[in-house]
């Protein structure tokens, strides 16, 4: 008998909706529908006609028609989900463990970074009362995370209380052909170039120090911060070694362009910072928060270069500890070394094939009912 699933997204993570759609449309025994906020629907390109826009309340649709409700993001609008959680089986994805489930209080210094930030946080904590209302997640009986190490950390929290939790398999290999017919090794830094999420200072210092034997082209594949990124890049442009070039972008990149450039990558350079914040609450990449670069590596079948603190996510990756490691790595990098690393990636390509991931997700969802 066919089971019906509703997937709700009122906030962000629109890219995950496309992953849900791509997998679920090929599954058996499951039908599904999306209910999304207008600000999300504008960012969805792959699922035309498969979603209903929900402006104010998630109760604008009849939940009786669905066997399972999936909350793709639960960071705000908590009161709108309260009755759903009590009436139907609900699977909720947890993206920021400290904010969403560990009950950590915000660091108030984050509120004073700018006038706009201050006003935004005041709205969240004084008007919307997110610190109090986020506790609604404790009523959810099924939780989902996007990586195994987050699952392990979640289970150590005092509030976990033996709830049902699983890693939700949404990442699969979409593109696996990496061509080595290029004048330069393409090193892509994917995602918005923000000092809050990436160690930009380390990248600039490294670019200014390397003297590679092979031509390297670094691509900052995301919108760059004007003051903290664009100006320093222009400043060091004429000081770099002749074998080093770079590209950067000043505005939001369309998904089609992002995907086209990602396919050309020989290496994904992921200079993630260890500590960041969400709504003023400290989060730690690799412990309480997943980097989107994990999905980038798997989706495009690419090898990623990560800082050593970031845990392996069951994929062949490379790591560094300090700037000197990066200098040595890029100075000696050539196409032969890249090809050797890609041979080590082959076993993972089958493990994360669309067929295998679809089978795992289908079984997990049916067992959640």
Image: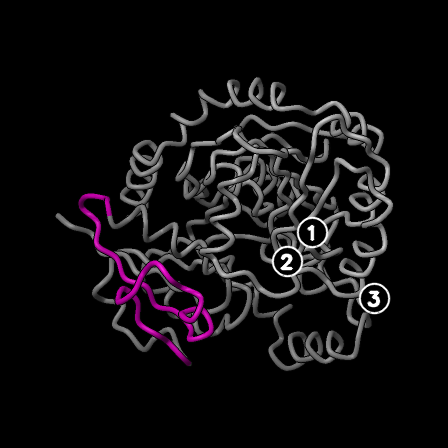
Residue 26 versus residue 8: which sits nearer the camera? 26
Q: Nearer the viewer, residue 13 or 69?
A: 13
Q: Is residue 210 magenta?
A: no
* Residue 257 picture location, percent across and down: 49, 55
Q: Where does the image place residue 83, in percent across and percent down from the top left?
A: 39, 70
10 Å crowding of disc 3: few (<14), some (14-19), many (20+): few
Q: CA distance from mark 3 to mark 1?
A: 15 Å
- What separation in Å lies between label 1 and label 2 (alpha carbons)? 8 Å
Residues rendered magenta in the picture: 26-55
| Residue lying at 20% horizontally and 52% vertically, measured from the top left | 3
> First in sequence: mark 3 or mark 1?
3
On residue 109, the disc is 3
Q: Residue drawn at (70%, 44%), measured in percent from left and top?
A: 272
Above-or-below relation of 67 to 184 = below
Eye-nearest disc, 2 or 3: 3
Query: Do tag 1 and tag 2 residues touch (Cβ < 8 Å)?
Result: yes
Residue at the spot 30% in from the left edge and 56% down from the top edge: 68
> For numbered disc 1, what is the local secondary structure?
strand
Residue corresponding to mark 1: 283
Q: Which residue is mark 2?
A: 99
């Amino acid at each position: 008998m066919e089971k019906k699933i509703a997937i709700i997204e009122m906030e962000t993570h629109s890219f995950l909706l496309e992953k849900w759609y791509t997998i679920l449309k090929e599954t058996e025994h499951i039908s599904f529908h999306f209910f999304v906020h207008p600000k999300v629907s504008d960012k969805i390109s792959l699922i035309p006609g498969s979603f209903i826009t929900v402006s104010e309340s998630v109760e604008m649709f009849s939940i009786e028609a669905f066997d399972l409700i999936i909350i793709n993001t639960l960071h705000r609008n908590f009161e709108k989900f309260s009755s759903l959680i009590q009436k139907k089986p609900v699977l909720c994805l947890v993206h920021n463990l400290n904010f969403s489930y560990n009950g950590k209080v915000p660091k108030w210094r984050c509120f004073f970074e700018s006038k706009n930030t201050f006003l935004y946080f005041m709205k969240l904590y004084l008007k919307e009362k997110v610190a109090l209302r986020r506790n609604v997640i404790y009523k959810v009986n099924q939780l989902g995370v996007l990586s195994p190490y987050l699952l392990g950390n979640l289970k150590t929290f005092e509030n976990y209380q033996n709830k049902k939790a699983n890693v939700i398999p949404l990442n699969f290999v979409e593109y696996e052909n990496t061509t080595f017919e290029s004048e330069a090794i393409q090193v892509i830094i994917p995602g918005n170039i923000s000092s809050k999420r990436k160690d930009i200072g380390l990248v600039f210092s490294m670019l200014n120090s390397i003297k590679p034997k092979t031509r390297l082209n670094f691509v900052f594949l995301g919108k760059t911060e004007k003051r903290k990124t664009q100006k320093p890049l222009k400043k060091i442009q004429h000081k770099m070694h002749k074998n080093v070039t770079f590209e950067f972008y000043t505005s939001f990149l369309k998904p089609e362009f992002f995907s086209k450039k990602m396919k050309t990558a020989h290496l994904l350079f992921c200079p993630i910072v260890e500590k960041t914040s969400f709504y003023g609450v400290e989060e730690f990449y690799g412990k309480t928060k997943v980097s989107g670069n994990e999905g980038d590596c798997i989706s495009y079948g690419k090898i990623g270069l990560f800082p050593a603190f970031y845990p392996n996510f069951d994929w062949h990756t490379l790591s560094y500890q300090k700037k000197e490691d990066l200098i040595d790595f890029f100075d000696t990098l050539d196409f032969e070394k890249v090809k050797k690393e890609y041979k080590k990636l082959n076993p993972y390509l089958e493990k994360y094939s669309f067929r295998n991931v679809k089978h795992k997700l289908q079984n997990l969802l049916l067992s959640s009912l």
